[in-house]
Amino acid sequence: MQPVNQEQNTAARAGKTDLRKLSSKEFVELLKNMGQPAFRAKQIEEWVWEKGVTSFDQMTNLPKALRASLAETCTLGGVTEVTCQKSVDGSRKYLLGFEDGVTIECVGMPSDKRLAVCASTQAGCGMGCAFCATGTAGLTRSLTADEIYDQVVHVRNDFGERVTSVVMMGQGEPFANYDATLGALRRLNSPNGLGIGARHLTVSTCGIIPMITRFSREPEQFTLAVSLHSAVQRTRDALMPGVRRYSLLRLYDAMGEYTDRTGRRPTYEYALIKGINDSDEELAYLCDFCRDTLCHVNIIQLNEVSGSKFHPASERRAEDFVRRLASVGVEATIRQSRGADIDAACGQLKQSFT
């Protein structure tokens, strides 16, 4: 497919109502103004959110005249696929474009009868993590809730399978775009959306403490993951300058409050970087940080990023971390990265394919 043409899209959509921007109440009002019964609003909502149609002609239970009227006055928004790459492990990485010309990447990861989606919450990222490809380009803009949601729908439609889990671990810091991220999570969870269980919807944050506290007070049982990458303050500050103002001590306290309030077990993500955070000292600090807390640690062998000075630690060292954490009562696993051959793994996403 060709890249998004901003000028053409703007002209095509000028003066039209984007149905993905409407609430249920606004759907009813729209159909009322068109002289249609209220039940038509529910039908259209199902086509938009549950079935993710890309054309009004696909709304086959609507009268032809209504479909024509909708096409004249409304748009279905959505995303445009610019490029898709396929990995040897079955994963697919998508470069998707929005109507303003901004692009993002997301990933679909099939496994047995499951399909996971790694979605982006921002175009680019402002956190500046030293080892992450996304952070090197900076932040373009935050995404809207429907732009986040539409990534998942696009992956579902491309695979032709139900999405069973979503991780907000693509481009961007979800808690720097909190309201849109929560809006997307709720739509993904809703029976009027994709109906994915809350515990299968995960938000990954660099550790923005005020938003962790806010997240702990949400009624849904969404899952929380925190990018830790070091339990030594000086190392973490160097690797993750965007959260330098939030000390590890404050993070430790905030995570304790989170587990006390929710009873849910968070995950710490730890990308193991050769010569940086893989020493015995780093391991000892990590054990102390996690000991006697409710948590799970995902050890990730750093994924290579072109031009980066950072390289992954050995698999044997990753196994050392898992064993040592287990010895102090902390459950840890080595997370197998997906799609590394197409730069679709953790820390490799950018805003354009090269």
Image (spheres, rainbow, N blue to C red):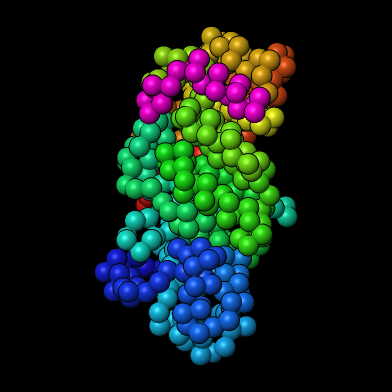
Q: Specify the quadrant of the image occupied by residue 63.
A: bottom right
x 37%, y 44%: residue: 124
Q: Residue at x 55, y 26 (%)?
A: 270
Depth check: 270 or 51 in front? 51
Residue 137 x %, y %: 32, 41
- Residue 258 belongs to magenta span: yes
- Magenta range: 239-261
Give x and y (percent) for residue 312.
50, 28
In the rendered view, does 2 fall on the left or right side of 214?
left
Q: Quadrant of the N terminus?
A: bottom left
Viewer-proximal residue among 318 and 224: 224
- Nearest the camera: 291 or 180? 180
Residue 204's place in the image compared with 314, above or below, is: below
Q: Position of residue 313 (x, y in %)?
A: 53, 24
Looking at the image, is 74 positioned above or below residue 317? below
Residue 141 magenta-highlighted: no
Residue drawn at 31 percent across, 73 percent down: 14
